[in-house]
Image: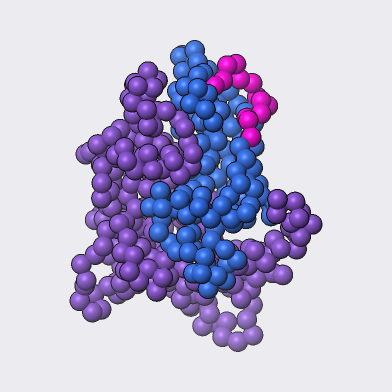
Amino acid sequence: MPQRHRGRQAVATYDAALRDWQACHDASSALVDAARSCHPPRRPERVGAGRLPTVPPLAQWTPPRPVWERPRLHIRDRATGEGAQHMADEALEEHLASLVGRPVGRGGPSVAPDPVNQPMIRHWAAAFADANPVYTDPEAAAASHFGGIVAPPLMLQTWTMPTPTLEGIAERGGSPVAVEGETALSVLDRAGYVGTLATNSEFEVVRYLRLGEVVSSETVFESISEEKQTRMGRGRFVTWVTTYTVGTGEIVGRQSFRILKFDPSGAQA
Amino acid sequence: MSPDRATSPAVGPMAVGDALPSLELDMTATLIAAGAIATRDFMPVHHDRAYANAQGAPDIFMNILSDTGYCSRFLTDWAGPDAMLRRLAIRLGVPVFPGDRLVYTGEVAGVTTEGDERTVEVAFRATTALGEHVTGSATLTLPSGG
């Protein structure tokens, strides 16, 4: 029972564990882009082609808020170069505001590599020892409110995860597929917010999925907060929303996911 | 959990403040790795201890998709197979490592009945010795006769 012996050490080890965990996330921040955008492997692009963010179709694009409606710039008290810093901040604010409503990653929907299927559901149910019979027992499921087998609702995110290229995954910092060029989040890394901490996840489920349905997902930035002082250091909360659809665009669920991108050099002890 | 429990009506009348049966999990490397792979999350920090160590973590740790998996199990173990999970919101706290005992507790925060459908709000949390791993709330609907 290691847990009992750890009782008194818990508080002392808490900060150390959190730091360790943070170090992990830091080193793997490239994964956040790749895992959340969930794209299938991409055809290599010519050198330099990936530098510019992909512009989404107009219908999916929300124009940035006018300058006068944006939050006031946060000008830090710096010994030198306040004016230059102001300009940099303004350019950054403008860039971040322009991301809202745009796809996270390279744009375009991610289509699940396989339809909703019993083997993957059985594997999932076994991993979490979830004995709910509506997932795996055809007779009990038929007798239930659902009238037949349904997929676990929170497998939504699993169906559209990319099929990984395992070779080299460690070298890519855990990214399941190679990510080329710049991604929308890298601007935050360049602005010094190199730390990544997942903070919130929220699912809304419209209906459960049935065997054979093919899920697509599309993820866009919902909001990027102004800079806030947090326990991890100065940072910005970034929220993106993934919409899951089947067939010809029927929405079956939605997930919003929030991370804190922060500058670990300013962490409070 | 026995199959009998899952196929029987798990809940009768419900009232605000009713406690859900707690779910206690003694996490192992196997459980963490199995959860990561079953959710198609192949990030090495969730299955490769040497890699996790090299990244500065004391061990592999549970991925977020496993969190939502266990939350869903915790809720429907109680609410039964006719329940439909409509919403799940979680706030993430301390990580979960092998050797941790993860304990889910929760209570009914609201019940409304409309027509033949009952809507139940649940507030819950999962803790380890290090502190709160997740706190959250969920909405489930059930046939009101159930």
On the image, the x and y values in percent for residue A153 come to 41, 37
Q: Quadrant of residue A36?
A: bottom left
Considering the whole magenta stretch, tell me its main secondary structure: loop
Residue at point 26%, 62% (across, down): A41
Left or right of A77? Residue A206 is left
Q: Report how many numbered discs are placed on residues in the image.
A: 0
Q: Which chain is blue?
A: B
Q: Which chain is purple?
A: A
Asked if residue B94 shows in the view, the reply is yes
Left or right of A54? Residue B4 is right
Whether residue B17 is in magenta: the answer is yes
| Residue closest to the eye, B108 or A96 | B108
On the image, the x and y values in percent for residue A142 come to 34, 21
On the image, the x and y values in percent for residue A23 come to 56, 70
The relative height of residue A84 versus residue A136 in the rendered view (above or below) is below
Whether residue A120 is in magenta: the answer is no
The relative height of residue A111 versus residue A116 in the rendered view (above or below) is below
Residue situated furthest bottom in the rendering: A80
Residue at point 51%, 83% (across, down): A84
| Residue closest to the eye, A31 or B32 | B32
Asked if residue A226 shows in the view, the reply is no
| Residue closest to the eye, B24 or A147 | B24
The relative height of residue B102 versus residue B85 in the rendered view (above or below) is below
Q: Which residues are magenta?
A: B10-22
